[in-house]
Amino acid sequence: MKNKKIVFLHELKFTDHDIEEIGRDTYAFIATFAYAIDEISVFLKLVIQSHGNKPNDETLLQMFAIQQNTITRVLSAKLVETIKLFGDYERHLKKEGKEKYLNALQPSVEALKLITRSPSFNVSRRLRNKVTNHYLFKDSLQNMDGSVSSNASKSIFLHLSQGNSFAPLGEEVVFLGRFWRYFEEETKLKPNMDRIHEWIDWNQSAAKWAIKTFNAFIIWLHHNEFPEKYGQRTIHYLEPELYGELGINRLPIVFGISDE
């Protein structure tokens, strides 16, 4: 195992009997929540990797911003869906009268109130359907009616490698145009770059809430429903090129290609 990184994990495995004990509805929620958390964790890693030193070149700075905004938009959409999932399950528990589970989730319910009161939550809901999950030229037409800056880039940059090509004009009209339009039409807040920074910070806070909620619920379920069950500590060996240090390994914006 020379040169490999040791990774310690803790495995909690459900049996068919366990699923029968907690109910198929609870297992379905856990499975869906786990799916969401896996996706959130992947995009959160990418968002964190995308931060750091910015290019000094003004054109490549636009490329940097497009990459960071793209990853954050997807994370944002995943978080909005996860918050909806959590609310659906909470309502299901109330309907079924499962007070024990409701009480276990109450700290997360309270913590979520601060997250959903943020304007960044509402703009994330708008972006999910208007920008992230769909491409709507009619919506872009509306953005152009006053929400797109007169100084906005109108350029497209092409590269020999198609993956290194980028088009700032799309980011300006579709994303930033819709972002500013939300604040202009639906809030009393001034649309400026502070709103973008708040939105990026909100995504990281909401992701931490989702991950903490999932972990806390699984631990609570373990202690209260399966106190006799022991998690198994597992050891794994990872190739060094697949290991990165937080804050050191940055996400590249340009990939090299062969001269041929």
Image (spheres, helix red, strand yellow):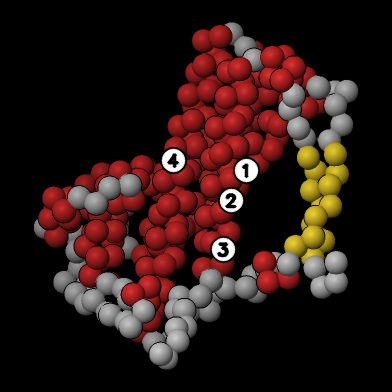
Looking at the rendered structure, the kind of residue marked 2 is Ser
State which mark lies toward you, 3 or 2. Answer: 2
Residue at image position (78%, 40%) is 11
Circle 3 sits in a helix, a strand or a loop, which is it? Answer: helix
**Mark found first going from the N terminus, 4 or 2:** 2
| Residue 226 point in image, percent of width and height | 81, 22
Q: For residue 48, which numbered disc appears in the image?
A: 3
**Residue type pointed to by label 4:** Val
Quick check: marks 4 and 3 in contact, CB under 8 Å?
no
Disc 4 crowd, CA 10 A, few/some/many (<14, 14-19, 20+): some
Q: Residues within 10 Å of mark 3 (few under 14, many from 20)?
A: some
- Comparing 60 with 254, the one in front is 254
Question: Residue 80: which numbered mark, if any?
Answer: 4
Q: Amino acid at mark 1?
A: Ile
Circle 2 residues within 10 Å: few <14, some 14–19, many ≥20 = some
Q: Are marks 1 and 4 in contact (CB under 8 Å)?
A: no
